[in-house]
Amino acid sequence: MHLVAESASAPNPLVPSVGEMVVGLIAFTILYFVVAKLVVPRFEQLYKERTDAIEGGMSRAQEAQEQAAAALASYQAQLADARGEAARIREDGREQGAAIIAEMREQAQAESARIAAAAGVQIEAERLAALAMLRHEVGTMAADLSAKIVGQQMADEAAQRAVIDQFIAELEADAGQEV
């Protein structure tokens, strides 16, 4: 019993005394006002700055992304223009090449015609020269033959030439009638 009586008169360690309660309440109030007036506004300011920085960074990133997209679109348009220009230049080159080829063909055909005409003139000149030489040879042989047949030679060369020309003309006339 003695134990129960002592425990009733001893203060309960779980219940604080009134003085401790008052000192604790005053300290809590002071601490609350210090935290409410100094710490909380600073935290709010830091929170706001951080939020602004994050949102600003996001908006700057969004702007940069939009600028990059605009630059990409611009570069793609320039690239498409450059490709179109290159295709046009290639087509112009093909057309110019075809025109040059056609011009060269015309020049080659003209040169070929000129060479053929010159060759024709040369062949005709050679034919006439061969014909003249042949007439001379035939004339000489005819004169020799007639001299052997008749027994005398024509003394006048002009008369001899006239006879030969008449003989050749008759041969040509006969050849023209046969054809």
Image: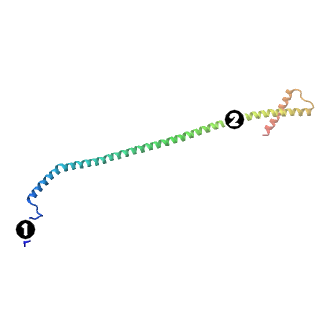
Q: Disc 1 designates what residue?
A: 8
Say if residue 169 shows up in the picture: no
Q: Amino acid at mark 1?
A: Ala
Q: Which is more toward the observer, 59 or 34?
A: 34
**Image x and y of residue 62, in percent:** 33, 47
**Image quarter hosting the C terminus:** top right
**Image x and y of residue 101, in percent:** 59, 40
Q: Amino acid at mark 2?
A: Ala
Mark 1: which secondary structure? helix
- Classify 3 as above or below 42: below
Identity of the residue furthest to the front in this view: 2
Mark 2: which secondary structure? helix
Q: Residue at x 13, y 54 (%)?
A: 27
Q: Quadrant of residue 102?
A: top right
Looking at the rendered structure, the number of numbered marks drawn on it comes to: 2
Say if residue 135 shows up in the picture: yes
Q: Which mark is residue 19?
A: none
Neighbours of disc 2 within 10 Å: few (<14), some (14-19), many (20+): few
**Image quarter hosting the N terminus:** bottom left
Instruction: Indicate which disc, 2 or 1, sits on the residue closer to the N terminus.
Output: 1
Q: Which is more toward the observer, 59 or 175?
A: 59
Q: Residue at x 24, y 48 (%)?
A: 46
Q: Which mark is residue 117?
A: 2
- Classify 168 as above or below 78: above
**Image x and y of residue 174, in percent:** 81, 37
- Classify 93 as above or below 18: above
CA–CA distance in space, label 2 to label 1: 152 Å
Viewed as shown, does residue 150 lie left or right of 107?
Answer: right
